[in-house]
């Protein structure tokens, strides 16, 4: 925002002193030449402005050409620069038990946003270095509402039968100004969780039941009927008894129970 402080009239132009109000330092004085209203009123449209000769395009045409130049710029980047990225290609290696963590972050293509510093880690409990079943149960108790039977939908974890045996733990952090600091805090927290779960000096955790109220509240909030009459999943066509179908009538067909 520019604010005029003083104007001094001259012969043909007026010199105005401006201070940039948005500058965090002291106001910088900038000298500019501004035409007076009386001088602009003296202009002659016939003498000072030449007649349009049809040698230019309107503003919409210039905007269209600018858009075409932008498209051509990125096409040249794709043609000349993209092949150079082949040198940085790496084969995809799925995560194993050695690297069970899945890190999720958000980026807005370089734009500054408060959520870009947030990191979240989802790890299967079966892949954590826990000693025995008591340590696994203790880790679930310590995780609290951060433990779930199924992986979160936005975690990037597919959830195979082997790794979803004991559920998943998800930890997020956005308290620190740098993304690496948040990621380090999450990693240290998971390490402390594993160390505390493997600590057998405090007994009695194996007798405590798991608190699944946060999972039940999530199911009830979805309002899909999964909480009704103790059902664990929504009924589908797969749950229809096969012995009721005409082609299976009279046969000894065992109904398939879905888990």
Image (cartoon, rainbow, N blue to C red):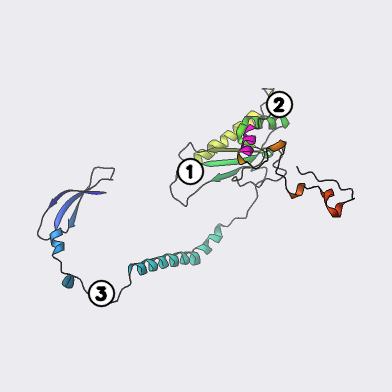
Q: Nearer the viewer, mark 2 or mark 3?
A: 3
> As drawn, is 41 to the left or to the right of 86?
left
Q: Return the disc, 1 or 3, that comes first in the chain's sequence.
A: 3
Mark 1 or mark 2, which is nearer the start of the sequence? 1
Tell me the tag on residue 52: 3
Q: CA distance from mark 2 to mark 3?
A: 89 Å
Is residue 80 shown above or below 91? below
Question: Which of the two marks, 1 or 3, is nearer to us in this view?
Answer: 3
In the image: residue 27, left or right of residue 105: left
Rendered location of residue 153, percent (x, y) = 61, 45
Please identify the dominant SS of the magenta region: helix
State yes or no: discs 1 and 3 in contact (Cβ < 8 Å): no
| Magenta span | 206-220
Identify which residue is drawn at 16% across, 72% down: 47
Q: Which residue is mark 2?
A: 206
Please say if 54 is above or below 100.
below
**In the image, residue 179 lies at what x, y percent?**
49, 42
Give neighbour class at mark 1: few <14, some 14-19, many 20+ (Cα, 10 Å). few
Of the pair 93 and 156, the residue shown nearer to us:
156
The picture quadrant where one finds residue 167 is: top right
Tell me the SS state at disc 3: loop
Q: Tell me what residue is drawn at x 15 percent, y 59 percent.
A: 37
| Alpha-carbon span between mark 1 and mark 3 | 52 Å
Residue ID for mark 1: 115
């Amino acid at each position: 925002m520019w604010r005029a402080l003083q104007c001094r009239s001259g012969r043909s132009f007026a010199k105005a002193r401006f201070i940039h109000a948005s500058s965090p330092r002291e106001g910088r004085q900038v000298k500019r030449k501004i035409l007076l209203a009386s001088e602009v009123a003296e202009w002659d449209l016939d003498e000072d402005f030449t007649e349009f000769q049809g040698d230019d395009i309107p503003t919409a045409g210039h905007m269209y050409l600018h858009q075409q130049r932008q498209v051509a710029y990125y096409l040249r980047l794709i043609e000349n620069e993209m092949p150079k990225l082949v040198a940085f290609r790496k084969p995809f290696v799925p995560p194993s038990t050695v690297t069970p963590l899945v890190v999720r972050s958000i980026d807005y293509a370089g734009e500054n946003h408060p959520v870009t510093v947030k990191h979240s880690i989802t790890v299967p409990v079966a892949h954590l270095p826990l000693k025995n079943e008591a340590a696994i149960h203790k880790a679930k108790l310590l995780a609290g509402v951060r433990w779930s039977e199924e992986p979160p939908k936005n975690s990037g974890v597919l959830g195979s039968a082997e790794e979803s045996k004991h559920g998943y733990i998800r930890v997020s952090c956005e308290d620190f100004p740098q993304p690496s600091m948040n990621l380090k805090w999450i990693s240290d927290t998971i390490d402390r969780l594993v160390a505390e779960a493997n600590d057998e000096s405090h007994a009695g955790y194996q007798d405590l039941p798991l608190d699944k109220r946060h999972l039940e509240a999530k199911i009830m909030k979805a309002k899909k009927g999964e909480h009704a009459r103790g059902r664990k999943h929504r009924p589908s066509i797969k749950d229809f008894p096969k012995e009721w179908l005409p082609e299976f009538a009279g046969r000894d067909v065992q109904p398939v129970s879905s888990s």
